[in-house]
Image (cartoon, rainbow, N blue to C red):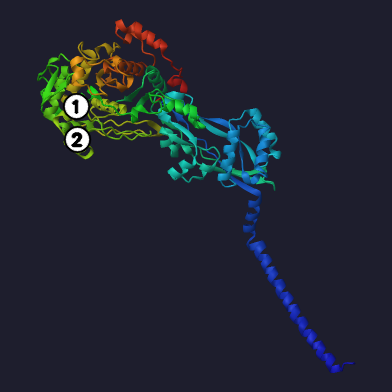
Amino acid sequence: MKRSQKEIEDSARKVGRRSLIMGGAMLATGAVLAARMRYLQVERASDFRLLAEENRINIQLLSPARGLIYDRYGRLVAANEQNYRVVMVRENADDVDEVLERLSRLVNLDMGAMARARDEMMSRAPFVPVTIADRLSWEEFSSVAVNAPSLPGITPEVGLSRVYPLGQDFAHITGYVGPVSDYYLQSSGDTDPVLQIPDFQVGRYAAEAQLEQDLRGEAGTRRVEVNAAGRIMRELDRDPATPGDDVQLTVDAGLQNFAQARMAGESASAVVMEVETGEIIAMASSPSFDPNLFVRGISVADYNTLTEDPYRPLASKPVQGTYPPGSTFKMMTALAGLEMGLIDPEELINCIGYIELGTRRFHCWKRSGHGRMDMNNGLAQSCDVYYYELSQRVGIDAIAAMSRRFGLGEHHELPLSAVSEGLIPTRDWKRANRGADWVVGDTLNATIGQGFVLASPLQLAIMTSRLATGRMIRPSLVRTVNGVSARMDDGGDLGLDPANLEIVRRGMWSVNNAPRGTAYRMRSEAEGFEIAGKSGTSQVRSITMAERATGVLGDDELPWNRRDHALFVAYAPADNPRYAVSVVVEHGGSGSGVAAPIARDILLRAHFGEMPPLSAYPVNQRRGIEEMQDQLDLRSFETPEETGRVQT
C-alpha cells in the first residue's frame, strides 16, 4: 500500500530524532570512556605502575653484619665468618618435595634436616625464605648456583655466621648467639623485620644477649627484577645494611687465658679488677665450654655432657655463683667496730679455741686457740674467737650496713646474664623470710662469713677494690661501644676514717707477709709487688658435737661435694694498689692452701704482663712453680702494640 507524502515526512522526522538520541548517547559514552582512560592513564598512572612493578620486582631484606667484640687490646673475641647456604621460598617452588629431591643430588642433605626444613616451611608464610642447608663447601655452593634454573624457589646465598676464636676462654663473658626461635619471638616481643631473614642470629647469653641492640645493626634492602617463574633476573638497586656497633671489652685476653688455664681441673672462679677504674680485666669460670657449639644448635649429646657435669661448666660462677664468704668477710666486722668506736685495735681478746653462748660452743678453726689477739693478729691469723667477741658489740645491723657500703648484698649492673645480688642478712630479713627472730648465734655465724651470708666472686672483688682505694669503685666490663667510651665514674669516697681503713689494710698485709699470717707461704717476692690479702674457708656442712669428740673429718675423707670451699681475696701492690682479685674454688678445702696460690699467680701475671718469672716466688717454691708453669695450656697472643689498638 502506497504511503502518503505526510506519512513519509512523519517517519523521516522520527528517524532523525532517534538518530540524534543514539548519536548523543554514543558521544556521551565515548566521552565517559575517554575521561576514564585519561583518569587511569594519567592521574592513576603512578599507582598502576607500582602495581605492575610489584608483579615483577621483589624487595628483599639484607642482613646486617653483627658488630665485632674485642678485648681491651683489640684482639678479636667474637667475629663473623662467611657461611655458604641455600634457602627456599615455598611459593616460588612448583613442587617442594620434587625440588628438594633434585637438590639432594647436588648437596648431601640430612634426612632429618630436610624434614625439619619442610615442617618450618609449612608453619611459616609461603613467601618467607627457609634455610635448607648451610655451611656448604665452595664446590657444593657452586653446583647449586649453576643448576639454579632447574631448582625453582631455591636461592644460594652467602651469609655471615658468628665464630668465637678464643673458644672457652670467653664463653661466660661474650656468651653466644643462636637462631631466632618461635620462643624468642614470643618471649622478647621483638618485632624487628630483620628477624625474618633466614638463619639470622641473635644473642642468647651473656654480653651477646645483653648488648643485642648495639651489636645487631639494621637491615638493608635490595630491589630485584624477577621473571614470571619468580627467578631473579637482575638487581635494580640496594640500600646497604647498617652493621652493628663494635664493642671493646675491658678484659685482657692474655690474662683471661692464664686464669682459665691456672684453674684447670677445678670447679672455680676468679675476678680481677683494676682498682682505680673498676675495669674487670679477667673474669674466669672453670670449667668452661665452647660457645661455638651453640651457634648452629648444640647436639643433645653435647648438651647432656655439659648439664650432667658436677662441676657445672654452663654456670658463670663469677656472677651467678654465691658462696659463704668465710673469713674474707671479717674485714667488714672489723671496720664496723672501728667506725663505731667499739674496739681499740690494740685491745687483746683471749682465744682458747671457742666461746660459749648459752649451752652452745662456737669454735675457732684452731682447736687449741690462738691466745691473746689484737686486731692485726686477729686478721692475720684469722682468729674466729676474736670476731665472735667483736660481733656481739657491733651487732648484725651495723655489720650489714658496712657490708653494703662495700658492694655486698647488692646487684651490680653488668652486661651478663643472671648477675646475683648475694645475701647480707638482717633482723628484718630473717623475720620476713624465715619467720623467726634474729638471735646472737646468727650474728656469730655471720661475722665469720657463715650462716645466711652469701657473696659472689664479683662482689668479693668489688669489696677488695674498695678496701684498697677507700672509694666506691663500680665494676665495668665494656670500654667502648662504636668507639665511644662507656667507662663509669666511681661513686666517690666511702666516707670512712682513713686511719681505720689503714688498720684493716695492715692486717691484710700481715696475712701474706707476716710469718704467722695464714697466707705467708703464698707471698710475692717480686720487687715492689707485695700482696695484701685474706684467706677464707667456708663450710658447706654442719659439724656435730659427736664428730668433734671423735675428731673432725678432713676434706680428703669426705666426698667432693661435702668439702669446704676455698676463698682468697687480695690486692697488690700493697703500698700502691693497682689490681684486686677474688678466687673461689668450690669444695677446694683450705683457702690459704688452694685459692691463695691461684690468686698470687694471677696477680703476678697481671703485673708482669706475661708468665711471672721464678724470681717472683719464694726460693723454696721455685722448682714446683716451674713445673706448674710448664703444664699450663696457654695460647699465644699478639702483644698490645702488635694489635694496633693499644690501651688508652
First in sequence, mark 2 or 1: give its number: 2
Q: Position of residue 286 (x, y in %)?
A: 38, 22
Q: Position of residue 404 (x, y in %)?
A: 23, 33
Could you tell me which secondary element the residue under label 2 belongs to?
loop
Give above or below for 80 relative to 583.
below
Which residue is rendered at x = 58% and y = 33% of the image? 134
- Residue situated in front as seen by the camera: 551 or 183: 551
Look at the image and tell me in which quarter the C terminus lies. Answer: top left
- Label 2 with label 1: CB-CB less than 8 Å: no
Q: Position of residue 398 (x, y in %)?
A: 16, 32
Give above or below for 90 relative to 66.
below
Tag 2 residue: 426
Quick check: can you spot residue 330?
Answer: yes
Tag 1 residue: 445
Q: Residues within 10 Å of mark 1 (few under 14, many from 20)?
A: some
Q: Quadrant of residue 4?
A: bottom right
The amino acid type, in three-letter code, at marker 2 is Thr
Give the CA distance from mark 2 to mark 1. 13 Å
The amino acid type, in three-letter code, at marker 1 is Asn
Apparent side of residue 105 relative to residue 129 in the rendered image (left or right): right
Q: Residues within 10 Å of mark 2 (few under 14, many from 20)?
A: many
